[in-house]
Image: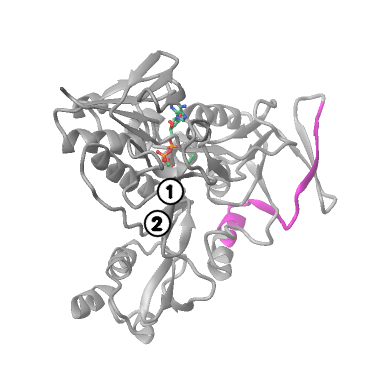
Amino acid sequence: MARHIVVIGGGPAAVFAAIEARKKDPSADVTLVTEETCEPYEKPPLSKAVLLGKAQPGDAPIAGPGGLAAHGVTAKLGTRCTAIDRAAHQILTTGGALPYDALVIATGSLMRELPLLPSGMPRVHYLRTEAHALAIKAGLTSCKHLVVIGAGLIGLEAAASAAELGVEVTVIETAPRIMARACDEKTGALILAEHQHHGVDFDLNVSVTEVTAQLDGSIALETSDGELYVADLVLVGAGVKANDALAAASGLDVQDGIFVDAQCRTSDPAIFAAGDVTRFTTPQGAVRLENWRHAQEHGAVAGRNAAGASDSYKAVPSYWSEQYGLYIQGIGWPDPSAQTVRRPLPEKSALVLETRDGVVTYALGINAQRDLAAVRRLIERKIPVDADDLADPAKPFNAMLKAKA
Ligand SMILES: Cc1cc2nc3c(=O)[nH]c(=O)nc-3n(C[C@H](O)[C@H](O)[C@H](O)COP(=O)(O)OP(=O)(O)OC[C@H]3O[C@@H](n4cnc5c(N)ncnc54)[C@H](O)[C@@H]3O)c2cc1C
């Protein structure tokens, strides 16, 4: 009898889990259940090419041009999982019950909502799905002033897209600097300068204290430093939280994210979980990662293991962001106590490397893709490096790989 493998979710973790499960066990009956009504699509373009009108969300199906069907996966679109019945080995959905031999939960993240600016309030937007992106894009066509709350990756990408469309943009951020979670002060300042060069205004180290809907439909926002902004549109990018309520309700071990072991197994051996929704142990402690590459690779491991493999996930986290002509990448585990080396690069590019015990542990680059491809391998293979060589643009990273691999 074919094994039933069920995957809940419609993001990269779910799609790669389903595809890899089928590859590992071609006789398995693999079903992916997603509440979204379309073939799973990539989220990264939503804040970039989609807002700019250069792409449609459906242009980039995660499973490739033939969709999930081309991989032998049954997709149940527009179907929400409402409960996991662990005793009966089945999930309950808006389309009925589905039995499973192995289950993968990949329900991703939910946006953190600000009580003063709830989703559903007219002209207030959050950005997570294609429907959100298309609504923001439509709103931007008649928008004169966009206020973005939050200078993290999503907020800044949306700010850059709006500025490129000619919209006046103000970014309000509670931290004293932008991208404080993702990058060092100097690199952050370079990105800030690029935004300012495109006319984006910043109000840092403040929070929104009062919100008033105006008679003409615009929104007045008062900040803790006494500024008043009137916006035609507000976009909130205040971070995300794990969408782990289903797992918690079914009694799985959930600690701000579904807790999984190195093989993506939850506290129930028949249930795996992957991607943004999980928390797992690393040498850096228990972490949640919220980026595309992690979701894809974690999902693949969960899917193979649900189909009978016993692969381990070895995370070297990485993310990218695109703002104007800046291609920003972070690879590895940032650590404020690590030694920092800055390699001089031409204008509008940067490369900062962190080392610990003679190996590179983190790298942050702007327009340094070629260097970072080699640095990723230095990090993954823990190759010993010389700090002076790292700082010397005449010493190629590839040579460090060849010399010491
Ligand atoms: C606008 C935007 C831009 C981004 N840009 C980048 C970038 O440039 N670089 C980068 O590294 N990362 C980026 N990310 C982050 C990256 O997209 C996420 O980390 C990744 O999508 C997480 O994948 P996931 O599969 O774990 O979860 P998600 O992609 O969140 O997918 C979860 C899916 O599960 C579905 N679901 C949830 N609950 C249920 C249920 N009960 N029943 C059925 N279906 C359910 C949801 O509808 C959703 O389709 C971006 C994210 C966004 C929103």
> Coloured how?
one colour
Q: Residues within 10 Å of mark 1 (few under 14, many from 20)?
A: some
Rendered residue at 40%/36% (across/down) = 106
- Quick one: quadrant of the N terminus? top left
Name the side, left or right, on which 344 lies relative to 183: left
Percent position (x, y) of residue 398? 24, 73
197 and 366: which is toward the camera: 366
Q: Say if disc 1 is inside 8 Å of ligand 1.
A: yes
Circles 2 and 1, Cβ within 8 Å, touching? The answer is yes
Q: CA distance from mark 2 to mark 1?
A: 7 Å
Q: Which residue is mark 1?
A: 291
Could one spot residue 38 in this view of the protein? no
Using the image, tell me which numbered label, if any, was put on residue 318. Answer: 2
Q: Secondary structure at mark 1?
A: loop
Q: Quick one: label 2 or label 1, which is nearer the N terminus?
A: 1
| Three-letter residue code for mark 2 | Ser
Magenta highlight range: 192-214
Front-most of residues 284 and 237: 284
| Residue 133 as seen in the image, left or right of residue 236 | left
9 lies left or right of 52: left
- Residue 86 lies left or right of residue 142; in this view the side is left
Q: Position of residue 311 (x, y in %)?
A: 24, 50
What residue is at 69 percent from the left and 32 percent from the top?
A: 118
Looking at the picture, tell me which residue is in the foreground, 325 or 314. 314
Was residue 207 drawn as part of the magenta stretch in this picture?
yes
Q: Judging from the image, what secondary structure is the residue with disc 2 in? A: strand
| Direction front: furthest residue | 87
User: Residue at 21% across / 40% down in the picture?
Assistant: 308
Q: Is residue 252 magenta?
A: no
- Specify whether tag 2 is near ligand 1 (CB below 8 Å): yes
